Image: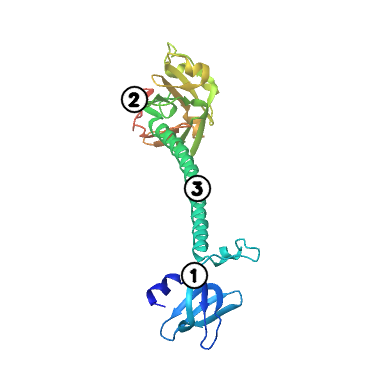
Amino acid sequence: MEKKYMERLVGKYCKIVTKEPGQERASVVSGILEDVDYKDGFVMINSKQGLGCLRINTIIAIKPGRIKGENGKKNKKSIILNKKGMMGIGTMIIFIAMVLVAAVAASVLIQTSQTLQQRAYKVGSETIQEVSSGLSIEDIVGYTNVGRTHVEFMAMFISPRAGSQYIDLQNTVITLQSSNLTVLKYDSNIVAGNVSEYGVFSTLNNSLLNASNYGVIVIHDADSSITTTNGMNVGDSAFIVVNLSAATHSTGVGPRQDIWGNVLPEIGLEAAYFMRTPAVFVNRIVQMY
């Protein structure tokens, strides 16, 4: 049997016809041809009886065939003995596993990207609102006592920044620091719709101003948002009046004293102020900012 023909049958189910020297009849061995050893002159065959070897010089003929059971039908063991089929099934299992893993990973990535997109949009909107909103302090004046020795009241002229969102005065606080630190809140009971003919410091009932609140005098409010909803929007302006005597727990702020603090809205940038009272109070109205 030539080498080039034997190698084509390796791994296949074959019927091998052999005849030993001195025997009159040939015998048939059926099984899978596992290997051919031309050097030692043997072939290895895996049959029902197990793994065995046959001499090449005793082989008369080899015929490829199919594995069959005793009833003539295809044997179930053929699937097990078919190495190419086993490799194909394994590859298919690995492929399906990779597809499932990729599908799960894609689903997680899509959900994560959607969540991040929503959070990014929310953070971006809040950041824009925080940066563009806020109050601006345009001017600050003081009002002294009759003897012009101390500043008793302070009025801040405020307005929303350009492009600012709605600012709720109910949630806007003012910090004031001189001899001590005071935090003032909005009081809706101390609001005037316009300036009195006697001036800013005669408009409010100053007896209601104490160490914990501030009053508001409307200067410009086309939609009446300050008086109806306690809020300011673009175009509005107002005076905030503070009782410095009550806030500092003294007779007021004397000459050459520093006053500083912040106007802190609920949303937006804070408005900081720093001022020093004049050395001499010539008039009862004192420019402080």
Residue pointed to by mark 3: 103
**Badge 1 element:** strand
For the N terminus, give its image quadrant: bottom left
Could you tell me how far apart the alpha carbons at marks 2 and 1 are, in whole angstroms? Answer: 128 Å
In the foreground, 89 or 34: 34
| Image height of 213 relative to 73, above or below | above
**Badge 2 element:** loop
Quarter where residue 125 is shown? top left
Looking at this view, name the residue that lies furthest to the front: 24
Tag of residue 74:
none
Q: Earlier in the sequence, mark 1 or mark 3?
A: 1
Could you tell me how far apart the alpha carbons at marks 3 and 2 are, in whole angstroms? Answer: 81 Å
**Badge 3 element:** helix
Q: Nearer the viewer, mark 2 or mark 1?
A: 1
Q: Residue 192 appears at what percent x and percent y? A: 49, 16
* Amino acid beneath label 3: Ala
Residue 212 seen from this side:
yes
Q: Earlier in the sequence, mark 3 or mark 2?
A: 3
Q: Are marks 2 and 1 in contact (CB under 8 Å)?
A: no
In the foreground, 32 or 71: 71
* Amino acid beneath label 2: Val
Q: Residues within 10 Å of mark 2 (few under 14, many from 20)?
A: few
Q: Residue 287 appears at what percent x and percent y? A: 34, 26
Which residue is depicted at the point 36% across and 22% down? 283
Report the side of 288 relative to 190 (left or right).
left
Residue pointed to by mark 1: 63
Residue 179 seen from this side:
no
For the C terminus, give its image quadrant: top left
Q: Residues within 10 Å of mark 3 (few under 14, many from 20)?
A: few
